Image (cartoon, grey):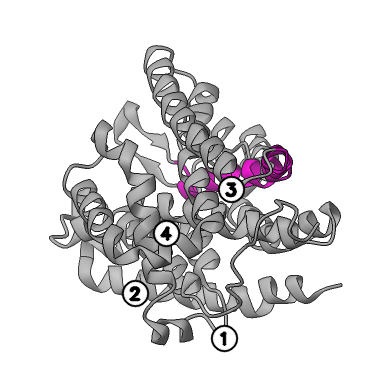
Amino acid sequence: MANALGITLPNIGRDNNFNFLRLVFAFSVAVGHAMYAKYNYSLGILFNGHIAVCGFFIISGFLITKSYVESKNIKEYFVKRCRRLLPAYCFVVLLCAFGLSAFSSLPPGEYFTSPMLWKHIVASLCFLNFLQPALPGVFMQGGGAEKRVSEINGSLWTIRIEVLFYILVPFVVLALCRLKTRKRINIALGAAYFFGFAYSQLWVFIASKFASPFLGGIRESSGYIAYFAAGIFCMINLDWIRRHQKYIIAPGVIIVVLEYIFTFNTALEFLLPAGLGVVIMFIAFNFPRLNNVGKNGDYSYGVYVFHAPLGKIFIDLGYYDLNKDAALLSCIGTVFSIAYMSWHFLEKKALRRR
């Protein structure tokens, strides 16, 4: 299936900064979530989780599509994806489900027999976290009659979308193969870009009119088609992007900066996949010293999947109320320590298994 698209693809090897970018994006999400609004961090504006998540999907569109095209067969492709995604994901779901019983307001007997616990486990392992995001009595919020349990790991919703894109990639490549020429492929990707934006706006409207966890889950999934399409476009047209990068980098940077200032502006949201894609490609294939980041391990996934429950543990224990700055540094340090162990003792071993 090598060169299945019928066009010359870039040979990027290991001479790129994608590991660095993914770590920056994961760090941005982790710090942004740790800086909960009530603690009023003045530097919180620098950590835009939305842009970071969008960046992840652009990189996924680039790398995952390239991985599929260069795989020997579809089995090899899915085996690689499962080995990269599932070990840490399943581990964090089960660790939280059983380990966070220590933070529940319920006694152990009531906690482990609660239908909420088992619904949470099954829903999460099926990537349907929105069906039961909370655990019984864990991380209570509010006061008095308004007291309610809190979502355990709010970042895992993006993994559902990632899995959906993994499944769709073979069909996307099959459709693009039939187009035969780069020009036709680019037109199709442009159409997907427009469709993704229009589709996401439609579901934003529907979800606002009919409150439902299921509709909310569809709305989340619909919003990132344009970013994945932008990543595929960058992969197919990388040589052109690099030849013209001095002309297109300034508009790309302007779009990203404006998105930082005017978050979720409709016009900027439409331009963001293209602008952010240009910025990512510029950073990924320049600044060779950044290539050293992540050579000894890709810690970004561990940072991403472990940070949210760890942050809530620090809040539940009252550390942020004692000293918010020390709590933030300790929390982020703990997140990176666990991500380090996750990579070396879990993720890397799963990738090496034959």
Of the residues under marks 4 and 1, which one precedes in the sequence?
1
> Decide: marks 2, 3 in contact (CB < 8 A)?
no
Query: Observer-nearest residue: 13 or 186?
Result: 186
Which amino acid lies under the numbered mark 2 shown in the image of this protein? Ser
Q: Which residue is mark 2?
A: 330
Q: Secondary structure at mark 1?
A: loop
Quadrant, the C terminus:
bottom right
Which image quarter: residue 240?
A: bottom left
Q: Find the distance from the CA under tag 4 to the CA under tag 1.
A: 29 Å
Which amino acid lies under the numbered mark 3 shown in the image of this protein? Arg
> Closer to the camera: disc 2 or disc 4?
2
Q: Find the distance from the CA under tag 2 to the CA under tag 3.
A: 49 Å
Left or right of 162 in this view: 255: left
Q: Find the distance from the CA under tag 3 to the CA under tag 4.
A: 50 Å
Q: Name the residue: 32% across, 51% down.
A: 275
> Closer to the camera: disc 3 or disc 4?
3
Which amino acid lies under the numbered mark 1 shown in the image of this protein? Asn
Q: Secondary structure at mark 4?
A: helix
Residue closest to the far left? 42
Q: Is residue 52 magenta?
A: no
